[in-house]
Structure formats: C-alpha cells, structure tokens
Image (cartoon, rainbow, N blue to C red):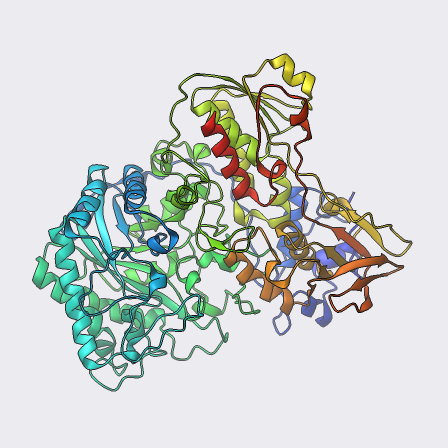
Amino acid sequence: MSKITRGGLSRRQFLTGSAITAGAVASLGLAGCAPKAPAEAPAAGSDLAATGEDAANVRAHAAQLNPQGEPKPVQNTTCPSLFTEWKMGALTLPNRVVKSAAGYIGVTSQGITGDLHMQHYGKLAAGGASVVYCDDFAELYDHFRAIPDVGKFTDWTDADLTAFAQNIKDNGAAAGYQLATMGLVFSGFEPDPTAIFQSSDCMDMTAEEIQNLIADTIKAAATLKRCGFDCVEINAAGENIGQTFMSRNRNKREDDYGPQTFESRTRFVCEIVRGIKAECGADFPVQVLINGVEENDKAIGDSALFTTVEENKEMCKLIEAAGADSLHIRIGPCGQHVAEFAGDLYFCGTGIEGTTGYGTQFDFTRHWQGMLKADQSGLGVMVPVAAEIKKAVSIPVGAVTYMDPARDPEYFEGFIAGGDLDFILMNRPLSVDYDYLHKLEEGRIDEIRPCTRCMHCHWDAADDGNLTFSCRTNAAHPFRFVTGQLTGGYDPEPAATAKNVVVVGAGPAGLEAARVAAERGHAVTLYEKKGSVGGLLEFANNVKGPHENLSVLRNYFERQMELLGVNVVLNTEATADTIAEAAPDAVILATGGVRDSLGLDETAGTNVVGIDDFMMADIAEEVVVVGSNAQAIDAAMYLLAQGKHVSVVTPSAAGTIGAGHSFWVKTFTQPNMKALGVRFWPEAEVVAVNDGTVTVKTATGIQQEIPCGTVVEALDSLPNGSLAEGLTCEVVTVGDAARPFNIGEAICSANAAARAL
C-alpha cells in the first residue's frame, strides 16, 4: 500500500487542492498561475499511485497547469471518412491521409544509401497513404548549397529521381516532393561549425539572391515534374526562408519583400507558386506548408511580432490566389526547431506538460492564442488552428503533429466528416507500422504497432553517447541496416527450415523475438514467470503516463502472440530442466537485466527502496534518486509531479544523465526539472545514509549532507545470462539480459536474433 505523504498536508487535501498554498503552488511549478479546478478527487483514504488508475489520478492533480485527460476507450475502430476521395487541384486521391515530408532529411549524414531510401519510401507508399511526400534530399538548387549537416544526396541524376518517383507510384501512392530551404547558405550567413542545428533567414539574403532562389525553386519543381513527381510542396514554415519572410518577428527588410503588408510578407512564396504554375502547368498541384500559429518558446509571453491565426488567414487567401492547391498547417515555435514537426514533445514529461525545453512551461489556455488542442498529450494538437484557417480559403487544408487516428478514431472521424479539415498528414506512425492505414481501414487497430513518441528516430542518444537514428518499436529502421544491427530487408525472410524455438521472458525483447520467429514460420513457446506479458511496460506506463503509449505497445504484442499462434506459458519460471523438456532447436533468453544495488542500509529517518518498488513504498518529502538512466529520471519526474523535493545522485558524467532517453526527450524535460528544483549531482556517490539526510561525496572529494527521507535506488541493470550455462542447444541472449540499455535496443537485438534462426 502506498503511503506517500506531502509535508503537513493530508493526502486528500493535496489531491483536492483544498490546501494548496502559494508555497505548494511554487513547488508544482505553478508560481504566478492560479491553480485550475482539479478533477474529481479519489475517496479519502484511497491508495496513491498503487495502480495505473491511481497513477493517473496523481498526474491529473499534479499537472495543474495543463491538465490532461486519460486516453479514451475506443468505441469505433474505424474512421470511414478518412478513406474517402478528395481532390488536390487536378489530382484525385483515394483517401485523406498524406505522408508528410519529414524524417529522412540528412540521409547521407546517417549513412543511408539511395537503395535503402528508395525501399523505405516504397514501403510507405504500399502502406496506403494517398500522397507520399519525401524530404528535399537531392541538391536541386543551381545557386545555393546546403550546409553538410543537412546531408543531401549530391550525386542524384534525373534518372535517379525518376526511379524514386516511379517506385512510389508503383506501390500505390502519388509521389510528392517537398522543396525546402533549411540549411541553405546565403552571403550574409556564417555557419557555426559547432552548432547542432542552424539555418539562415531572409535577412541574410541580397535582392539578387532572392530572385535566384525563386528561380531555382521554380526550376527544381519543373525538374521534379519531368522526373514523374505528381506534386510539390513549398515549405514556408519553421526554419525555411518562406517563413522568415512571412513572420514580422524575423523579417526586418525594407524592400518589396519586407513585413509592411500581407502582400509583401507573402510575395516570396506567391512568386514561387505563380512561377511553378507558369512553368509546370496550372494542373500541376502545389501545396504550401506554413506555421499556423507562432509563439515565443524562448521567452514566453514576448510574442508581439509573432504570426497569429488571424494574420495567417489573410496571408493564406493571397497564397490561394497565387495558385496554391492545398495548405499544410503546423505549429510555429521560434526556438526548438524539432517542435515544429514534433510538437507533442511539449507533453513528454509527467507533470510538466507544456515544457518548452528552456525551463519554462506554456499555459495552453493562454499561449498559442489558447487555440491548441492540448488535453490529450498533443493528439491532434493543431486541428483547431487548421480548422480556423480553413474558414478563410476554398482549397483543401490539412494539419500535422501527432496525427494518430488509432488512438482516438471517433475524434478523427468527427473533424473529417464534419468538414473541419480536408486531410491529415502523418509521419512517425506510418514508419513504425507500414501497414497502419490498411489495419485502420479494416478496423484492426489492436494490430497496429504504436508509435511511442520517444523521438529516438530523430537524433537518438546511443549508449556510447553518440547521436544515432532509430525507431524504438520498429527495429527495421534504415539506420539499423547501416550499422549492421540488422541484416536482410525491411521484412524478415521466411525460415528455410522451421525450428522449435523457446523464448524465455515476455518483456519487450522476448515478445519481439517470439513475434519475428513465429512470423518467419518457427514454432514458438514463450515462457514468462509472471501472470501477464509485457515485462515492465505496464509499470513504465504508470510511471511515465500514457504519453508514450507503452500500455498500447504491451497490448499490441499480446495480440501478435494470439495472431501468430505463439504458445505463451505464464506463471512459469523456465529452468534448464523446463527448457530441456521442450526439446527446442534454439533458445532465445530475454530474461531482463539484474538490478544492481549499493547495499545501502536504512535508518530510522531515511528508508531505502528500489526502483521496482518505489510506487508502493513509503516516500518522504525529501527524496534522493541514485542513478541517472532513463528509469531514474522518469522516477524523479513522477515524484516531482507529486510535489516531492528530488535530488539525483549519480557517478556518471553530467552529459550522460538520462541515458536511454532520446536526445530530444532529455532536451525538453531536464531544464524543467532543474527549474522546478531538482538538483543533479553528477560524478558523485552516496557514501552514507543518515537520519533524515544522506552524505554525498563529489568528484572534488568534498563530502556534504543533503536532506533525504527516502533513497530510491535506480542504478543501471547488469547482464543476466546465467541460464544459458546449462543449455546445450543453440542459445542467444537478447535485450537487457545481454546488454542493458532501453526498450529500443532490446527490441532491436531480439529482432536480429529471431532473424538469424
């Protein structure tokens, strides 16, 4: 039974908000913001955070600034209106789902070859999207080159582009290409070789460069049409030049392309659209991508010159008049580029929903003009903004940013059927499960492998500290083939000889191994010592909240075991004798890692609990989390959301704190944790547990006491391959049992092992 208390407040007082003082508000990160009316409180004496339902109650009351609803039970499993025809200019399209141009710019910097790139887009097209837009991955501009970090193919010919477009069309989709200017270098721009991301803007351009870029873009569109592409998109959002002309915040020019009027702000984009139509024909569709609404994430509230929805309505009228055939609407922060296409990162921290990555939080009732749909962890966040812009134009309008209809089919059906939007744009979910749309259309949403919104696909932080690119739940990501972690094609080959395979452990690694092995034709028996599959997924879901869809991932795996006929044996701890009785040809051990411990002794004033038990333990007001991996940081965030005072002590270096989280999740959560009072002690260790304090020894050799009523041990796990020693058949150890790190690496190693059988 959980006995978590909060200072002098009773549990009921804390949850109902009846005793929240100015100090309590400040501890929750709400200083200066009046608490909103809380949701219905649990009954007096109810256990706190002992179950998923209780954990949900904690989050609902702790995240007072931007309270989140729990995922809705799915009633209808289809979205019939998404699968109706519509027209983009002269192009008739079979459904209202478009694959957005995102995710694989920088292909060469990732080491991805042209063949891998083409195969990936062929899979996306076969998945059922009506249009598949690709990134601006080829050098198409005559006068300008991008900085190397953009990673374009520099040697692609017209023949290569023709083959690429034809591959998309042969697989059933219209082929689209996004023309973007992010990373182009102009005369007034000095690239910083140390920057992770940088881009020039309209203020770096001479009048001649403006005309050259307009001409280059028109010529590039003509090349793409000649090579068989069905449409183009002009990226005038984010860090692209078109956006910098349209935004008064960035455009300070005093010529015809300045911010003086709506006409001058849109002149650059409109001249490109008109030029493409003149060069390629009025029937060649042109889509324009814009920031639907802008906000200052670097300095919240200082947004006087940021583009409003009302301004965009006027500018979109001009873009339509220039000949644009459709509009693509996304979110527009000025600082965190990644949030422009992954705005759901604002919701990646438990209890700090609205995190900007700069140590502050948006109030979604006030910022972004209060127009974002911000009550379901970012699901469909831009729909209200795009719907408002649609009122001003007659061409089709679509929105992007966490468009995942499997999470709430009724909501998506409602705004399409109701005419609020004409189409949606998706990216990550379609790469996670290439058959997403076919399954959605057929009502098989429980078979869709979920995107967990972890952002490992965009600048992942590997266990060696290097930046990589991967997908947490779909191991068959192009980069995995580059590194050699996977071999073969995107789809595992059928087994040459069917084997009797035993998998031990039904966590993510074991479930993935069983899935792939069974899919290849092997007979699979899966042993799990607990009474359900999923390993720690449900526990992680309770700690992290529903944002990452980890409970959905568990359910997906469980459904796959049913569909593939895996013999799942629960409540059975597999031993060497158990396995020998099954007479397997091969064994995959996915038993998970072994928790390490410092062996700290409790005192009368300070208790010591493990990470697996902390949700059920007595937790004091002052908490020290020992460890700095992803689980340690998730636990710290969970406790912080309850108003606890949290310190994190780790022997690891500061740069490795949050190891296992993606680069972007760390970027968005850790500044807020620090702003809310979490103290990180890198390169330090707990050397003593005292009554109400612990003694911490730092890298300087200094020892000091810090307040602590509870120590939560969350050290890195250790490998656990001991069971292999008693087996005589083919054995491979995967996941944390072999190399503890995170869910993505566990799933990848399991996929590779099952492919090798």
- Residue at the image position 14 percent from the left and 69 percent from the top: 215
Along the line of sight, the residue nearer the viewer: 293 or 536: 536
- Residue at the image position 16 percent from the left and 59 percent from the top: 221
The mark total stands at 0
- Can residue 40 be seen? no
Residue lying at the far bottom of the rendered structure? 254
Which image quarter holds the N terminus?
Answer: top right
- Can residue 427 be seen? yes
**In-image side of 153 versus 463 (left or right):** left
**In-image side of 259 versus 487 (left or right):** left
Q: Position of residue 305 (x, y in %)?
A: 38, 79
Along the line of sight, the residue nearer the viewer: 522 or 386: 522
- Residue at the image position 32 percent from the left and 46 percent from the top: 417
Residue lying at the far right of the rendered structure? 604
Q: Position of residue 433 (x, y in %)?
A: 40, 39
The answer to which image quadrant residue 150 occupies is bottom left
The answer to which image quadrant residue 320 occupies is bottom left
556 vs 316: above or below: above
Along the line of sight, the residue nearer the viewer: 303 or 683: 683
- Residue at the image position 46 percent from the left and 28 percent from the top: 756
Along the line of sight, the residue nearer the viewer: 647 or 444: 647
The answer to which image quadrant residue 19 occupies is bottom right
523 vs 619: above or below: above
Q: Position of residue 385 (x, y in %)?
A: 37, 62
Q: Position of residue 460 (x, y in %)?
A: 49, 53
